[in-house]
Amino acid sequence: SNTSSQVVIQSFISLSMSSNLSGGIDFGTITTLPVVQRNATYNYNLSGDTNKTGYDIAVSTDSNVNVDFCIKASGNLNTSGGASIPIVNEFWQDSSVNNITNPSETNKNSLTTAYSNITATANLAPGNSNYYRFWLNVSSGQAAGTYNNTISFQGVQTGTSCS
C-alpha cells in the first residue's frame, strides 16, 4: 500500500559572511598596555577603503523573509596557559549603513555568552547587509600570550527570538 508525504516550507533564509568576517576578528599584536577600544583589523579597512568596515553578513535575495541577527561569544578570550581577557572587554556594534561613522562605537555592546538580538538592524530585507565593527580593551598587567574565543552569529526570521 502507498501513502503520500508532504511538507510546506514557509520561510527560507540564506546568509553569507564576508571573507574578512569568516576569516576571524583579529585585534593584531599589542605591544603597550593598557589598551582602550582597540580596533579590529578590518573595522576601517574594506579593500583599502578606510571609511568602511570589512565585516558584514549579507541576506541573499534568495531569502523570502526579513531577518533579525543574533550574536554571542564562546566566553572570555583565553590563552592555552589559562590567562584570560574578560568577555566584557570585547565589544561590537552593527549597522545597516557602512561608512566612516556607522557602525559607531558610541553605542557599542559587550559580548556575552548568550545570544543577544541585534536590534540596530532588525527586520533586514533580502538583498541587504548587516555591517559590524569590533573593539577590545586590555588592562595593564595582562599576561603575554595569544588569546582566543569564538564569536557566533545567527540569522532568524524577523520577530523570532535567538536560540
Image (cartoon, rainbow, N blue to C red):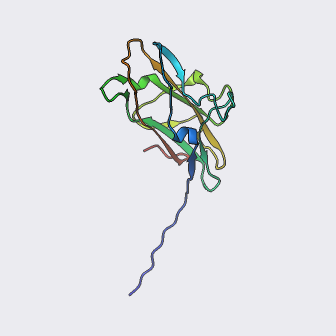
Q: Which residue is drawn at 51% across and 47% down?
A: 156
Q: In which quarter of the view is residue 88 placed?
A: top left
Q: In which quarter of the view is residue 21 placed?
A: top right
Number of marks drawn: 0
Viewer-nearest residue: 147 or 3: 147
Q: Residue furthest bottom?
A: 1
Q: Where is residue 129 in the image (x, y as percent from the top left)?
A: 63, 42
Q: Which residue is drawn at 64% across and 50% down?
A: 126
Query: Is residue 119 shown left or right of residue 76?
Result: right
Q: Position of residue 73 (x, y in %)?
A: 42, 34
Q: In which quadrant will I find the C terminus?
A: top left
Q: In this view, does 158 lie above or below 137?
A: below
Query: Is residue 144 shown left or right of residue 13?
Result: left
Query: Is residue 8 shown left or right of residue 113?
Result: right
Viewer-nearest residue: 161 or 38: 38
Q: Where is residue 22 in the image (x, y as percent from the top left)?
A: 52, 41
Q: Residue at x 36, y 28 (%)?
A: 78
Q: In which quarter of the view is residue 55 placed?
A: top right
Q: In which quadrant will I find the N terminus?
A: bottom left
Q: Which residue is drawn at 64% across and 30% down?
A: 45
Q: Is residue 19 above or below residue 139?
A: below
